[in-house]
Image (spheres, rainbow, N blue to C red):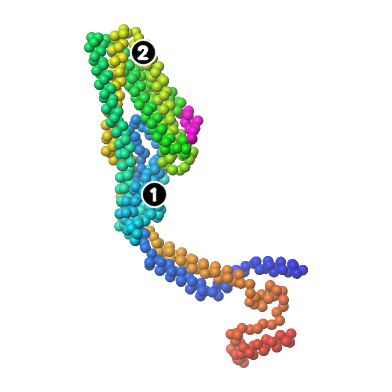
């Protein structure tokens, strides 16, 4: 029986009377109002002393970069949104790099007593924000500062420093290519001069000054074949060098990732199509319907290959670092370029063997002329090709990259973005009102003291025999009634208890 009583008491204790809570809140209205007023006052003091924060915004357009076209896979853009996203992420990292941000810090921030400027990591995290617009190639660059003019100045320095850094990176890369081509052009010119001297000496010794039409036809065919071989060999060497560079930078992070079966399928298809195209050297021109249809198939397969490579990179890259993802994509594309070049090399070798059989039909004197003329044509073709690429590299080195364009210059903010006065005051009001109310209610619920006669009967189950009135309680004034002193009240309460 006692246990049942305790359970009932426990259940009653767990029940919260909303009316009682409302009365509790009303009894402490003064405390709640004062607390809310203090919170609003503190918020007002914060707004009065807080330093305002202004934000300057600039809009940049980030386009996919285009190379010199020396690689078949790099010269054909796939238009894949993954490439645009990767390019934008890469440029965002360059914009927030030390080479760009530290000059902005030194130009806009004051050093401390020890002569040190704010830390780079903290400055970037606090002041710089880059946000891409969904499904566009637009990137928003936001810079915050304590003043409106300071925000605009810092953002202008940041954007200009970013564009300058892109130019430096592009020019440094083109400078290496230009220096390499300059050396190759010099050696190629010597080889061409030596081949021409040999041909002239052979013509003079053997009295061959005007080749026959049959010799000229075979020479032209061999010249076209050697041109295709030289270009294919140059693409192969370029792809191998690029692959070695990508593997070296990837190290163990991503170098072991194998391409997917779909990539392998597209690589095989592309290699077969390029080999077929190589077999048409000397037979059809680029305007022939067969060549046009074949070129169209090659473009479609190349686009599908680039799309699949971007998909694999985004799913299997060892990290979300855009630079590492770019290296991984370069690895796959150069591996495909090597497979294509090797396949073309096999097809061109077959044509070369056929040309050798045709050359065997000529007398030794004419075969010697054809071979020397072939060497001269090859040397001349290589020299012309290298000279052309050298001029392209020189132009590319001095050109300013156009992959990033400034759409909107950094703005001059009119109003601060922080602190937000109305929001701050509203939060202070809500915190003061509900915080103080919650405190009053919690204190009331946690108070286990017996405060009224009803509490005695409710929690202890005992009858109330008498109540000692509060000292400040007084009897109501009225006709025939006089105020009772606390001593009279006490005596009356004790006598009532004695009679009972």
- Which residue is found at the position 30% from the left and 12% from the top? 368
Q: Residues within 10 Å of mark 2 (few under 14, many from 20)?
A: some
**Residue nearer the viewer, 189 or 402:** 189
Residue at 34%, 36% in the rendered image: 66
Image quarter in which the N terminus is found: bottom right
- Separation of disc 1 and disc 2 at Cα? 62 Å
Vertical placement of residue 212 versus 188, above or below: above
> Between tags 1 and 2, which lies in front?
2
State the image quarter where residue 190 is shown. top left
The answer to which image quadrant residue 385 occupies is top left
In the image, 451: left or right of 388? right
Residue highlighted by disc 1: 130
- Which segment did they paint magenta? 256-266
Q: Position of residue 60 (x, y in %)?
A: 34, 46
* Residue occupied by mark 2: 356
Q: Is residue 259 magenta?
A: yes
Q: Earlier in the sequence, mark 1 or mark 2?
A: 1
Residue pictured at 68% horizontal, 66% vertical: 11
Instruction: Label 1: state its secondary structure.
Output: strand
């Amino acid at each position: 029986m006692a246990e049942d009583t305790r359970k009932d008491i426990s259940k009653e204790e767990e029940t919260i009377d909303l009316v009682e809570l409302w009365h509790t809140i009303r009894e402490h209205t003064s405390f709640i109002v004062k607390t809310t007023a203090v919170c609003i006052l503190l918020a007002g003091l914060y707004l009065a002393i807080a330093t305002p924060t202004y934000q300057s915004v600039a809009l940049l357009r980030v386009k996919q970069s285009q190379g010199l076209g020396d690689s078949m896979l790099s010269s054909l853009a796939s238009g894949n949104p993954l490439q645009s996203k990767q390019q934008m992420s890469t440029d965002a990292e360059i914009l927030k790099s030390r080479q760009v941000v530290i000059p902005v810090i030194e130009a806009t921030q004051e050093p401390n007593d020890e002569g040190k400027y704010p830390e780079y990591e903290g400055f970037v995290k606090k002041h710089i924000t880059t946000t891409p617009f969904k499904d566009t190639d637009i990137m928003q660059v936001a810079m915050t500062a304590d003043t409106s003019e300071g925000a605009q100045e810092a953002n202008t320095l940041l954007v200009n420093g970013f564009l300058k850094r892109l130019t430096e990176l592009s020019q440094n890369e083109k400078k290496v290519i230009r220096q390499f081509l300059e050396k190759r052009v010099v050696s190629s010119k010597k080889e061409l001069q030596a081949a021409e001297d040999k041909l002239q000496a052979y013509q003079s010794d053997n009295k061959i000054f005007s080749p026959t039409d049959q010799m000229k036809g075979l020479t032209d065919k061999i010249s076209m074949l050697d041109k295709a071989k030289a270009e294919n060999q140059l693409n192969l060497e370029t792809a191998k060098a690029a692959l070695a560079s990508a593997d070296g930078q990837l190290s163990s992070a991503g170098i072991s990732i194998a391409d997917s079966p779909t990539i392998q399928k597209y690589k095989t298809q592309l290699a077969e199509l390029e080999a077929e195209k190589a077999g048409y050297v000397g037979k059809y021109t680029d305007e022939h319907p067969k060549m046009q249809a074949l070129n169209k198939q090659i473009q479609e397969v190349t686009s599908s290959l680039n799309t699949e490579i971007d998909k694999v990179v985004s799913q299997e890259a060892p990290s979300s670092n855009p630079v590492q993802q770019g290296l991984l994509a370069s690895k796959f594309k150069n591996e495909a370029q090597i497979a294509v070049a090797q396949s073309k090399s096999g097809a061109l070798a077959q044509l070369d063997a056929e040309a050798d059989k045709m050359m065997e039909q000529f007398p030794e004197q004419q075969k010697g002329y054809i071979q020397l003329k072939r060497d001269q044509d090859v040397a001349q073709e290589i020299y012309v090709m290298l000279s052309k690429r050298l001029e392209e590299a020189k132009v590319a080195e001095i050109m300013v990259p156009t992959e990033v364009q400034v759409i909107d210059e950094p703005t001059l903010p009119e109003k601060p973005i922080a602190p937000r006065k109305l929001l701050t005051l509203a939060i202070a009001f809500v915190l003061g009102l509900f915080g103080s109310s919650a405190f009053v209610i919690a204190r009331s619920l946690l108070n286990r003291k017996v405060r009224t006669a009803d509490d005695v009967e409710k929690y202890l189950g005992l009858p109330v025999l008498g109540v000692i009135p509060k000292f400040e309680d007084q009897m109501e004034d009225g006709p025939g009634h006089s105020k009772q002193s606390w001593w009279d009240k006490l005596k009356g309460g004790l006598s009532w208890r004695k009679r009972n």
